[in-house]
Image (cartoon, grey):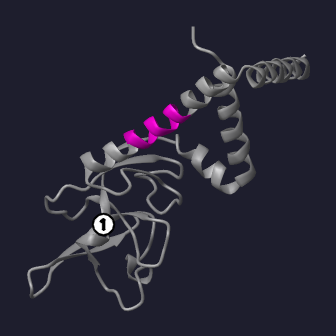
Amino acid sequence: MVVAMIKDAVNKQVIELKKLWDNKADLTFQLLNLAMIVFSALMIWKGLMFLTKSESPVVVVLSGSMEPAFQRGDILFLNNQDNPIRIGEIVVFKIKDRDIPIVHRVLKVHEDVNGEVELLTKGDNNRIDDRSLYAPGQMWLKREDILGRAVGTLRYVGMVTIMLNDYPMLKYVLVGLMGLFVLTNKEG
């Protein structure tokens, strides 16, 4: 029953693709439609970057180091306004020469002799502070290391992102299917 439904759906998509290929005007229209969707998503992302002053306004929690506050797979919304960061706030920071940002709580705020504020962080579920995670020789985070502070969350929605990273082939299949459906489905 399910296999027959899937075969039927695939056959319909193949027929629609053949029709689309034969009609170049419709094909061009659908490709422009797909491009508009992609560029709209990019504009929304860039708009969020501008509004939040963060290069990464949305992040996914990848580990259990912040449990019970945040679970693996939670999506966090960040804001990186210039107001001072306080002890107890949850920040996302990036370490030099590492690609993946880290979500942890501010444990200490230190002002050095030049008046520059420095931060020490720790995961709620970790036994020790994060100095071992920082770059070699780095004892404190500087303000420029901070991508933003957590201002909102969506529980477990980011598990999709984790699955797509764990199984890269799934990412290509899903993107291909989404592109196929955008190309073959017509408006009104």
Residue bearing the label numbered 1: 146
Residue 55 placed where, x, y %? 35, 57
Residue 96 placed where, x, y %? 41, 78
In the image: residue 141, left or right of residue 85 = right
**View extreme (front): residue:** 24
Identify the residue shown where x is 25% and y is 56%. 80
Is 12 above or below relative to 168?
A: above
Binning the other alpha carbons within 10 Å of mark 1 as few (below 14), some (14 to 19) or many (20 upward) gives many
User: Dot 1 lies on which element?
Assistant: strand
Identify the residue shown where x is 42% and y is 89%. 136
Is 107 above or below relative to 90?
A: below
In the image: residue 131, left or right of residue 11 = left
Identify the residue shown where x is 81% and y is 22%. 18
Q: Which amino acid does label 1 sit on?
A: Ile
Can residue 166 be spotted in the picture? yes
In magenta, the rendered stretch is: 35-44
Q: Nearer the viewer, residue 117 or 168?
A: 168
**View extreme (bottom): residue:** 137
Q: How many marks?
A: 1
In which image quadrant can residue 15 be found?
Answer: top right
